[in-house]
Image (spheres, coloured by chain):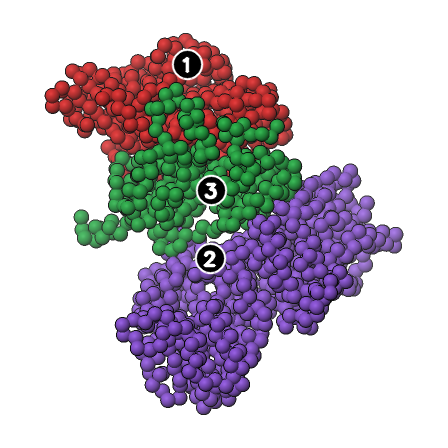
Chain colours: A purple, B red, C green
Amino acid sequence: MVIPSSVDPGFLPRAGLDRLLDLLTADGRRVIGPTISQGAVVYDEIHRAADLPSGWTADQAPGSYRLRSTGTDRQFDYAVGPTSWKHETFPPRVPLTIGRRVNGQVTFEDAVPVAPLVAFLGVRGCEIAALLTQDTVLARGPAVDRDYAARRAAALVIAVECVTPADTCFCTSMGTGPEVTAGFDLAMTELDDGFVVRAGSPAGERLLERLELSPADEARTSAARSAVAAARELMGDPVPTGGLPARLSAAAESPRWAEIAERCLACANCTLVCPTCFCTSVTQVSDLDGLEATAERTWDSCFTLGFSRVAGGNFRPRVQDRYRQWLTHKFATWWDQFGSSGCVGCGRCITWCPVGIDVRAELLAVAPPPTELSDATTQIIGVPGPERIEAVPGPTTPALLTAMTPLSDAVESPTYSRAFVAERRRETVDTVTIRFDTDDPDLLAGRPGQFVMAALPAFSAAPISVSRFHPDGLELTIRAAGAATRAMCGLRRGDSLGLRGPMGRGWPVDAAEGHDVVIVTGGIGLAPLRPLVDALFAERTRFREISLLYGARSPSDRLYVEELSELAARPDLDVGQIVDRAGPDWFGRVGVVTSLFDQRHLDGSKAVAFVCGPERMMTATVDVLRDRGVTDDRIFVTLERHMECGVGLCGHCQLGKAFVCRDGPVFSLAEMGPAFGREGL
Amino acid sequence: MHGTHPQTGERRFDVEGITRVEGEGSLRLVVRDGQVTEAQLAIFEAPRYFEQLVVGRTQDEVLDIVARICGICPVAYQMSAVHAFEDLAGITAEPAVRSLRRLLYCGEWIESHALHVYLLHAPDFLGCANAVELAALDRGAVERGLALKKAGNRIVAVLGGRPIHPVSVRVGGFSKVPTKRELQAMRPDLEAALGHALGTVDWVSTFVAPDFEREERFVSLRHPTEYPMSDGRIVSSDGLDLAPTDWEAAFHEEQVPWSHALQAHMGDRIPYLLGPAARITLAADQLHPLARAALDRIGLADAIRRNPYWSIAARAIELVHAVAEALDIVDGYVPPDRAAEPWKPRPGTASWATEAPRGLLFHHYEVDERGRIATAKIVPPTSQNQAAIEADMTSFAPAILDEPHDVATHHLEQLIRSYDPCISCATHFLDLTVEAAR
Amino acid sequence: MTGAVRAMIASRPRLGIMKFASCDGCQLTILDLEDQLLDLLTRFDLVEFAEASSYRSSGPFDVVLVEGSVSTPEQAEEIVRIRRETPLLVTIGACATAGGIQALRNWADHDAYRAAVYAHPEYVESLATSTPISDHVAVDGELRGCPIDPGQLLELLTALTVGRRPQLPDESVCLECKRRGTVCVLVTGSGPCLGPVTHTGCGALCPAYARGCYGCFGPREGANGASLATWFKRDGRTDADTARLFAGFTAYAPPFRSVIDSLGGPPIASDQGEDA
């Protein structure tokens, strides 16, 4: 769809490019555009038209890029190179917050985004799609990356339509090019003697007027159209996208993943050259005493081992897990999350893979299009995964391309507020419960099952479930699993720490109304369920029988021991406790938590279950619950994943189509579908 | 055994691990009837067999490998090797590349000399055990030394990526050369460093050195127009003058049982000395005018020549020289047309000598038909200085025999330190337990 | 000395810096932290650092940084002794973490090596192998690199004083290369590069200087050297060329070692590299 413009297309002779650059400079814009450096066409600052890659193109193939002289004076005769515009809109390192700690008191200050005016010159159709894709992820809510939004707002987009695609290009399949149809201020098409220029926004119209071009004649506009059409013809449709998300979710257990892992280096190049990949981590840059530290948002990748690591384990230890995560996210679950494909077909991941893995070939191999299917595969695909029944997106322009809404009125991600230690109670040898005073109304309005990001300057922030809400504060039960949580466990009365939240979606208390409630938990998993128990008792009559089944490694590993005794004494609650290893003072049961079901009558049709514990314990519990007839829509679990931001921006906690931090951490099994318990997700 | 033997009257001075030197060595002096009977600088650094490690390697790989002989002077190893290989390949680096090589070398001289003057050697003159104690006395001085060292490291890092084991030196030139702007960006630091270097000269000239005169026999490179660094002829204070490729005609190496470093001698077992004192003695006329003026001002040229303790002044003067020359190169820099000349490997003999911070460093390689190394011989300055150090210990010892034993031993350790021995370099290759005295 | 001062000194960790077979470059990196050196030295009680201080200590220590590989019988005994003297032992650099360039002799005939360098090999006592510290004693942490990176060293020392876990990611060099905007030298054909299989930490130096990474930080987690070697072969490199590339400063680290072995070994003296 072409946005109609009141200013007619003009013709900019090649010699006039410097005038365009002068206008942009006069507007105070730094111009970023293609230039030859390090053996490639890379985006860098452009001062004069002479800085452009006049007479250069590049031959691209899987794992190979070679500059080649064209012998013409064309300046945009190349397909996209190694850099993408995200270097400018989403730089590799950006300060987020500056934290300080003096005498036990913390302060946090958000870094102010610095976004000087820029103009991007030579943006391709696929690249506009990439910018719009990242807009959706980072700047259209629910949370917003302030730095990105500011930089994006400061950028003027001057597109140049691609007429020389590389062998690695497949924008035609992804519906993002080579035509430039929206998302630009000016769009140019290169001819031998100059450019046909049209405006795509009010800012572009003003610029076009100031250029004072003669109108582009019919011969030129038609030559421009046919050049782009020829480029489309050249690319064909190398990646049939019909039903691709469903095809991919059906292929979750394909042996091909392990085969790819034999070749894949897990070096992360594909994700870093990808113009839409947005995963980041937060790194701490601190002074020698850790009294002042800047938290920086840093490019990361789902291919690194650390990316999915949590205290005590890793959710994607194998390279095949990580490749599957990347590919299925890009081509399938991105639709669920953001309503478009995550791939724009630019081909960078193919060219810049050091061992030439071609995502087009892998897609065809992992999830072949229906026409090439054997009967056996058709049968599998005939039963689409539960999470992908509706959408069978074809090679159409993603919805977002037609919807250029202004960047964001969306909610900003919350900032740290200070909370003070009011009371501290040791639970086990490595776990304490701290009651914090806070006057942050957002925190006080939290719901059972929600969590907070807790931070001390110089330490990485930690997601911690709220273990009780008070009118003037909240409790956190913290296990000293790493350096940050160890430091938090060491806080004294009156000390402060930073809290951001509440985050995520908590327990659906209302779903239990009129039902029997079964709460099953293990170890420290009791902490996020404690506010649920509080909530159930606050309105006890809304619910039928309530059971709390609690397993721990040993009697001394149990949390809230006194409270448990008080609860066990209540007539309106059934408490079962069990430990793996008994101590001398233990007269209760010994075994795994699921054996507590043995002596209990449970009418699955009337029950709602809430489960929290180690993943293996939850899988075993779910098996029992299903056996007893509890349906998946009435089984709720809370999941642990690596989290850095807590608001769905950093990408770490993805699990299938969900961001655990934002969409969870509480999920019903029905929502999760086959993702629950699947290895390597 | 340590101290005076009750029956024989033999005195032994042992320092098991000499501190504030680079690498692991010990010294032993045995005195009987007022006569020094043994003076040994034992280098017991673990052998690493570099001359074997390079066999079968390409010449560019050798540049990366030989750097690892020494963490303080990696550039020196790269320079001797790269010049040897280019000489064999028949390449003459274009002037801008040659200047950048000298700039890189200046960076290493600054870093190495500043380290030795401030962190290793000066504490001896001021009665400190280390730079932390020195900083307690005179923090400004230590900060000045660190700023100088940083300026030198910065040069190496700008040209080669990092201060230790830089990565850009390639046969034919560099893998990448800096822009004019990148070099200019160092200018403020270098200007400050020049002030610090001149301040260093003034500072060390106030030191009081023990009295001692040695027999002078110096060897260094000499170039018609430049202060000795990356090329020139080998000359000596007693008239030697030969091409750098002919080192083996005048010098030879031998193994002594108490050291993992092969010792080098001139002619018929004649010890000789390399390094800053040798260069200043043999090429003072070619010092940068600023360095020359500083030398004249402090009037220590003779002391540098005669008394090894005054090597600290020689290093200070060379700091001025290296910073001043670096500034000149930065100001005159026009980037070369290409970072490296193309070249084809050729078989034959590749040899060259350059001036490492500690003195003449000779490399000799046999290169095979494929351009790979068949044999290698690397003669670092410290192994060449060993014999002279031992000879100086022998002549110095009688003067301190009346001192209390620990004081005398301390004096000896200081004497060793004044030569800035680089033991990692010297070790062709560890612990030697042979005790010659037994 | 007042009680308060004594308490402060007592709270400064006793730090020892030790050297085994090495070039001194990694301990020199400590002295290269020029801007922080004097401040750092007030936070630690530097009781053993022969390269820079005349005070000596044989323990006990709170933290020991060890440079160099184990290559003599004495060193093999000494490292066991040091391990008993310290609760925290961190190895620094390619020699200590992987055996160093001198570990190439592990593939060779050691006696022949010794005889080729020394006229009297009997005076020289060295082990037939050069091995990482972790082959001899348990190691609590490591800094990779030949030499170590000053930024990572500062991060380690800062983390030690603050009491947090140092941020030393185990990822490929490629991430840093891309963050700093360097174009991939492997893909543009400017040279073979070990970056994709090499542990990060150097700041992606070599590609920024227009050459391939030579792996001096050693293999990263799960380094798929076999796949990279296969690609090099498709790209026209001989097995011997690829073996030489892996046979650098961290050759003896297991994932690289197995690649080297599968390609016929390093070009050691006894085998001149059959790739003419």
Residue on which the image places disc 2? A295
Q: Quadrant of the C terminus of chain C?
A: top right
Disc 3 element: loop
Residue on which the image places disc 3? C253
Q: Is residue A445 above or below residue C155?
A: below
Look at discs 1 and 2 and give the one toward the viewer.
Answer: 1
Look at discs 3 and 1 and give the one toward the viewer.
Answer: 3
- Kind of residue sitting beneath label 1: Phe
- The local crowd at label 3, few if under 14, some if 14 to 19, many if 20 or more residues have their Cα within 10 Å, is many
- Kind of residue sitting beneath label 3: Ala
Evaluate whether residue A234 shows in this view.
yes
Evaluate whether residue B78 shows in this view.
no
- The local crowd at label 2, few if under 14, some if 14 to 19, many if 20 or more residues have their Cα within 10 Å, is many
Residue A490 tag number: none
In the figure, is residue A316 to the left or right of A489?
right
| Image location (x, y in percent) of residue A218 | 88, 54
Disc 2 element: strand
Q: Is residue C112 above or below residue B175?
A: above
Residue B251 tag number: 1
